[in-house]
Structure formats: C-alpha cells, structure tokens
Amino acid sequence: MPGQANTGLSKAALAVIVVVVVIVVAVGAYFAVTYHPVSKKPTAPPPVINVTKPTVTVVSNQTITLAPSNPNELVDISQTTSPDCLDPATGFYGQDTPIFNVVYQTLVIWDPNNIYGVEPALASNWTVSPDYKHYIFTLRQGVYFTDGEQFNATVVWFSFYRTIIIGQGPGVSNYMFLLFNETIYENYGYAIPWGVCDAMTYATGNAAYASNVTLCAYALANLLSNFDVHNSTIQKIMSYPNQAIVVLGPYKVEFNLLRPYMYFLLDIASWWGAVVPPAYVDAHGGVEPNQPNSYLCQYGLPGTGPYVIKSVTGTPGEFTEIILQINPNYWGNNYPPGSLPILDQPGHIQIIDLKISESHTNRVVLFGQNKAQITYVDPPFLSQLYSAWSPYNKYLPPQSIIHPYPELTPACIMMLSMNTQRWPTNITDFRLAIEHAINYTALLYTYYSPLINMTLAKLYLGPFTPLNPVLYNPGNLPFYSYNTDLAIQYLNKSGWEGNFYAVLPNGKVIGNPNGQKIPTLSIYVIPPVTPMVEAQLEIVAHDLEQIGIPTAISYVTSAEFDSWTSPSVTGHLIYGVGWCADWPDPIMQIAMSILMGSLPTGDYAWYNNPTVNNLLLKAAFTSNQTLQIQLSRQIYSIVYNDAPYVWIPDPMPFFIYQPYLKGFVVTWTGYYYNTMYYKPVTISIITYSNGTKVTQIS
C-alpha cells in the first residue's frame, strides 16, 4: 500500500488516555478536599549583601630542572666489583656485561620484548634446520672494526674457534656438547671445535692432526695466531664441510651442532658469540690453548659496536675506572633512524665513565648530588639513598629512581658452595649439617627495603630456577629447614665418619671425642664486600658457631679465585657465588654448569656425580617435555640429598638511575648504554596567595 499518514488513535492508546485522565481528576479532587490555604503576612525582601570574592594570585613560581651537569657524559658507579677481563673470550663476570654489550657484537642480539627471541645484529638473516642441528647465517656487509679490519665469514670462523681453543669460561661453559666434544676435553684437557682436526688433515695431508689431540690443539692455535685468509691451506680448512663452523662464502657461514639444540640462537646472542679482529689478536699475543691473552684482558679489543674502550685504570679483577667513547664510524650510523633493532642502534651519549668499586658512601652521595646517573646500593639502604637525593625527593617518589625487574629474578642461582672433594666438606652429613644450621629467613630479610616495602630477593631450591616453571622442583621437595637440633645430629654423625669432634657453645662435645678437633674453616668471599653481604656473613658465621663449626671470613680477589683450578686449592666454603642463565634454559644454562663442570665454568663445589651427569645430558637435549620433567625430578632428588650447595637468596634485579635518563633497556645480559639518552625533568612549584602549592612535573 502506498505510504499514507495515520491520524487515528488505537483503542489501546485511547484506553491509556482515559486512565490518565481519571487519575488526574482523582488527584485534583483530593487536593480540592484536603487543601486549605493559610493566610500569610507579607515579609520584607532580604537585604542585598555585596560579597567580594578574594582574588587568588600566583605569588611564586619556582622551577627546578633535573638534568646531567654534562650532557655528553654518563657516569655509572653501580659496579661494586671489577670486571675480570676485557676480552669477551675470557671475561665471565656479570660486571663485564655493560662493557661487552656495546663494544663487541654478535651475529644475533636479544629481542627486549621476547625472552625467547632474537633479532639481527651482524647477521642479516638465517635459517635453521628442522632438527635444530644446522644454522646458516647470511652476514651483514659494510661492517668494520674500529681498527679498520673488515667483518666477514672468516672473522666468524676465527672468533668462535679462538673462543673455544683458549679454554676459558665463556667458550667451555657455552659450547661444550654443541661445538666441541666433551669427552676429548675431559680426557685430554683441550676444547677443540669438532671436525677441525679432520679439516687440517684434509687440507695438509698430515693424518697426525686427526689422531694426536695435542698436536691438533697447538696447530689450530698456531693457525689462528698467523691467520692469513688468503692462504689456500687455511681456506681449505675453513671450507671443510664436516666441522663445527664452515665458511660457505664471503658473507655466509654454517654452524653444525653435535646435538640438536633449539636454543642455540639464544646461546650465541651473548658475548661469547662476539666477533673480534684477527689481525689485532695476532699482533697482541696471538692464541694459545687453555691460555687467556693477558694483553687483551687488560685493554680489550677493537669491536664493531657503538662504543670503543678509550682508557682503563687498574688491572683485570681490580679495575677502578673504564671509560668508553662513542664510535663515530659505527656501521649503524649508515641506516635510517628506527630501521635497526633497538639494541643495534647508535649511541647518543658521547662518553661513558664507569667508576668501579666506589664506596657505599660515594655511591649514595654522588648520586644524591646528581654527579652520577646510575648507581647501586643494597636494598636496606635505599631509604638512605632516597633521603640523600635532595631536593628532588620532595617532589618525586622513590619509584622515579628505583626500578625493580622481578621478571628477571629466575635468571640466577646464588650459593654458598661446599667443596665436595676436601675434608671435612667432602662428608655428606657435614654438608647437611650446614644446610640445616642456617637461618634462611634472616638471610632473606637482609634484602628488605622499607622504602618500597619489598623484599628484593627470592629463595630458590636449586639446582634449577623457575626459568621453565614446569621443570622447577617437580617433586615439590621442601626447602632445607632451619633446625639447629637436626644440624647438630648431622654434625655428630659426620664427626664419627670423619674422625673429628666439635664443641657446642654450651661446652658439649659431639662427634668422635678421640678424633681431632674440627679446625676453623674459612668462608671465602670476593671483595669489595657490601654492608648487606657483611650482615649475611655474620648470620652464617653465627649459625655455624651454634652447632660447633668455627669459621673465619677470608677475602680472595677475582684473579685468585680464577686460579682455583683444582679441588685441592679451592676453599672449603665460598659465599655469594652464583650462576646466571644467559638464556632461559635452566638445564644447560644453570644445572649443567654448577653440577658437572669445574672452575671456572661454575662447579664451585667440585661436585661430580655420574648419574646426575647422564640425567642432565638427556634432559638438556630432548624436546620431549614429559621426559624432561621426569628426568628433572630424579636430578632434584639426588642433588637434594648430596647437598653440594647451600642455596642462598637470589637478589631481584633492580636498577637505580636518574629520572632524566631515558631509554634504559634491560635484557638477560644487563643494560645497554647505546639505547640511553637524556631528557631533562622540569619540576614547577607554583605557590598561590591563599597558601596552596601545586607541583607540576614535565
């Protein structure tokens, strides 16, 4: 039907209107009956009062600018312990990372937004075989070291083989089982990239290289010390297909693993995957099997990164200042802004001044006076630091300078190691006595910060941490209890096993009274020792004395500590040693290092249990998670009863830096100076005439 206006009302609508009318009429009738007007006398209107509102005006506008005194320099005083070496093939302390992260570079680099991901660095792209045993990298062109040497595939071959053959912590810990054979290393004492001995036999015709391990090791070191990429023999060796690393072309290289490993890209993203200039190495001491290069440890090397080492003060393990300078010829300068991954980007701040091992007072005062941009104090002293940060603490909260990273806490396991090969710590019951003698709650409380009401540490039951939660303590074993009576029982039993006696504080003798009195045991620690660590040492010493074990605190330098290459010279007890995963794999990255290695690879207790070793190898290189969980449960049970370590609180990573320092990016290997830049903070305090104060931050 064509559209037509509808002017009628339905019956339902009419009924509603009728009801409404009825209701209205009823209400009107009610008021007609009940309403009786009352006469009122007229009242005078209220007087008009003129009110004058007070005018609020600004009486003062104070501006405080928080900015660096020198916009071209960053002062970092956070390092309480010195780097142990400036050569990435040897340095293995966490204190090395801020330097290594920006001076040297790797084929791939961390993705800050994905702990299991990497991004391109010196490799522009790569492919991975389905079985995770073969990795082929296409390398970035136009990259040069700061000494002018060109980066290419032969540099990769040289750098990795050098890192392995010199047999130091980085190469041994991270490439055993993958790029070199552990059996040869254990039997002959040389870390040799697998297949290279056959490659030298192939290229030279000398079969002795393939049959004589020592000859092969020294021949490889000699080749690397006289590295001439134009030499046809060296070219044949590098291109030999059946070896750990194969040069496929000027800018293409292949890695071949002994075992399938899905986390290999994460492995080489850290500094032991760094490349170094061959000619510079050869001109400054060359390469020797199982020997660090002392010159390179002292002064470092030219790198390809956004910064260079300008100067050093002190010696390895006892550096007091290291100054970095921006690399003006950095290859990243040739790329459009924003086109590179964030960790590859050029630096912004010209000079980085690392002042190392500053006193606690200096780390508080210099930061409080805005003379340093990055600092560190132990958690109990955060309030002291914040109080010294004046006048800024009147306007900015503690969280503007204190930045915890709880998501990174499981990266490390911290320990009091007990030498399982020296009397009396070689007695299992003696170690169990120590396990139950220590007040872990008291140790954990030393990390409490009243300022932010947070305990900046966690306690993990080793040998894993929750890097992979399903593998952490799958049998739900309880943490060792703080039980003095139980500890005394274990010590009494061990006294009969080890033919010694101990005297309790009340004079009671336990153990074998006809044996020798237990001697004073040294608890070794690497200085400088912070006030918090001093408090922890006091707790441990006191607790051990309560069960009759006398102790003394002994200090050992990092250089001396690195010289402990056998159980007989390693201290009985070492406090505060730790092992941090450089990628999120708790089996290969933590447990294998602290349970089946040796110093300096991380086995501070010289623990060696063949059953545990076999279980770890099976667990590390399987992709079957159900099997991994079963194996982890067995590993936990054995290690729990063997007790090679006391698991002590693991500090939660937190960083203290000025609010105007922006671009503070943190990954598994610390922070990166090249991402940092300055943006001054303006504090405006506006005071009004009515007494009101308003603070504005911009």
Image: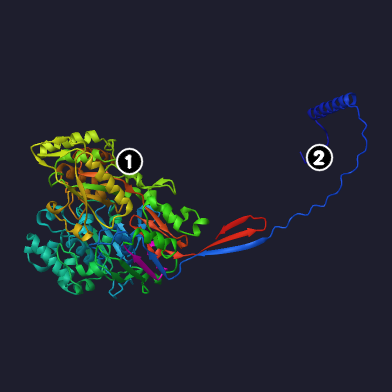
First in sequence, mark 2 or 1: give its number.
Answer: 2
The percent coordinates of residue 299 (x first, y second) are 26, 70
Q: CA distance from mark 2 to mark 1?
A: 86 Å
Magenta stretch?
343-356
The percent coordinates of residue 567 (x first, y second) are 13, 51
- In-front residue for pair 565/317: 317
The percent coordinates of residue 429 (x first, y second) are 17, 38
Residue 584 in view, yes or no:
no
Q: Amino acid at mark 2?
A: Ala
Position of 64 with respect to 229 (left or right) is: right
Instruction: Look at the numbered disc 2 and give the secondary structure of its residue.
Output: loop
User: How many marks do you count on the picture?
Assistant: 2
Identity of the residue drawn at 15% across and 36% down: 509
- In-front residue for pair 240/560: 560
- In-front residue for pair 338/383: 383
Residue 406 in view, yes or no:
yes
Residue 169, quarter of picture: bottom left
Q: Is residue 222 above or below residue 527?
A: below
- In-front residue for pair 457/130: 457
Q: Identify the mark at residue 343; answer none if there is no mark.
A: none
Instruction: Please state, as top left, top right, bottom left or bottom right, where the C terminus lies in the image.
Output: bottom right
Q: Amino acid at mark 1?
A: Thr
**Residue 347 falls inside the magenta stretch:** yes
Name the residue that disc number 1 marks.
Answer: 441
Name the residue that disc number 2 marks.
Answer: 5
- Residue at the extreme bottom of the image, as rendered: 148
